[in-house]
Amino acid sequence: MTTKIAPSLLSADFARLAEEVARCEAGGADWLHVDVMDGRFVPNLTFGAKVIETVRRLTKLPLDVHLMVVEPESYFDDFTKAGATTMTIHAEAAPHLQRQLVRIRELGCKAGVALNPGTPLAMVEDVLADVDLLLVMTVNPGFGGQKFIPHSIDKIARARRMLDEARSGAALEVDGGINRDTIAAARKVGADTFVAGHAVFSAKDLAGEIAALRRLTMERA
């Protein structure tokens, strides 16, 4: 599967949002990752439908919307109308996970499911037929700029085996502490989609950083 780099707008300069989005697009980003936090599932409060709508007007890139929220189903309609391409919900916040994933697809979006570092992969084994993206969190969600949890590598490897055994075509995405020091190891064990926030937006040369990350995903030996 072709690797994808998804800069996280959580780390962008929102005073210059249009410019930041344009830089990502010109710099070779495959997707844009939009973190939605409700101040309940995670401590911070971030973007809603208006920001998704604004970003959608600025780019044709797929919008990878990550819902770190309780009662995620209450956001589905608004986020679909705003222009989300993929909506990823947390297994920990979705007691009716299968139904909610089906609903996302019914609305015309791709359906993703995310797992926190302390959540076992078994939580999603029975919904893989309804999943277009599996997101393994490699930090505890809620804040940008955190360090990659080293033993996440084993979990990513197990997630790859689980998807392969289920003959799933779902993307295997990782989010948290992805940079030049961590991306190759995550790719080597089977991740194919990489959310990078601080690494991309703190770089002096954004396009050069995306290119460097992509090169490292090709070094699988």
Image (spheres, helix red, strand yellow):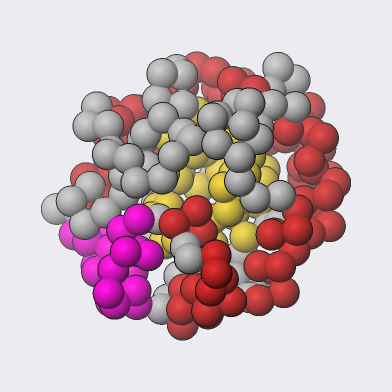
The mark total stands at: 0
Asked whether 134 or 130 is in front, the reply is 134
The quarter of the picture where residue 152 lies is top left
The x, y position of residue 91, in whole percent, is 60, 24
Q: Is residue 64 above or below residue 142?
A: below
Q: Is residue 221 above or below residue 186?
A: below
The x, y position of residue 167, in whole percent, is 52, 37
| Span shown in magenta | 198-219
Identified at 57% across, 47% down, the residue is 35
Q: From this viewpoint, is residue 28 visible?
A: yes
Asked whether 133 or 168 is in front, the reply is 133
Magenta segment's dominant SS is helix
Is residue 129 one of those drawn in magenta? Answer: no
Quarter placement of the N terminus: bottom left
The x, y position of residue 154, in whole percent, is 27, 28
| Residue found at the far left of this picture | 221
Asked whether 130 or 46 is in front, the reply is 46
Q: From this viewpoint, is residue 187 visible?
A: no
The quarter of the picture where residue 74 lies is top right
Identified at 18% across, 51% down, the residue is 181
Q: Is residue 166 shown left or right of residue 144? A: right
Identified at 69% across, 26% down, the residue is 70
Identified at 28% across, 68% down, the residue is 203
Q: Is residue 78 shown left or right of residue 59? A: right
| Residue found at the far bottom of this picture | 26
Is residue 218 one of those drawn in magenta? Answer: yes
Q: Is residue 44 shown left or right of residue 194? A: right
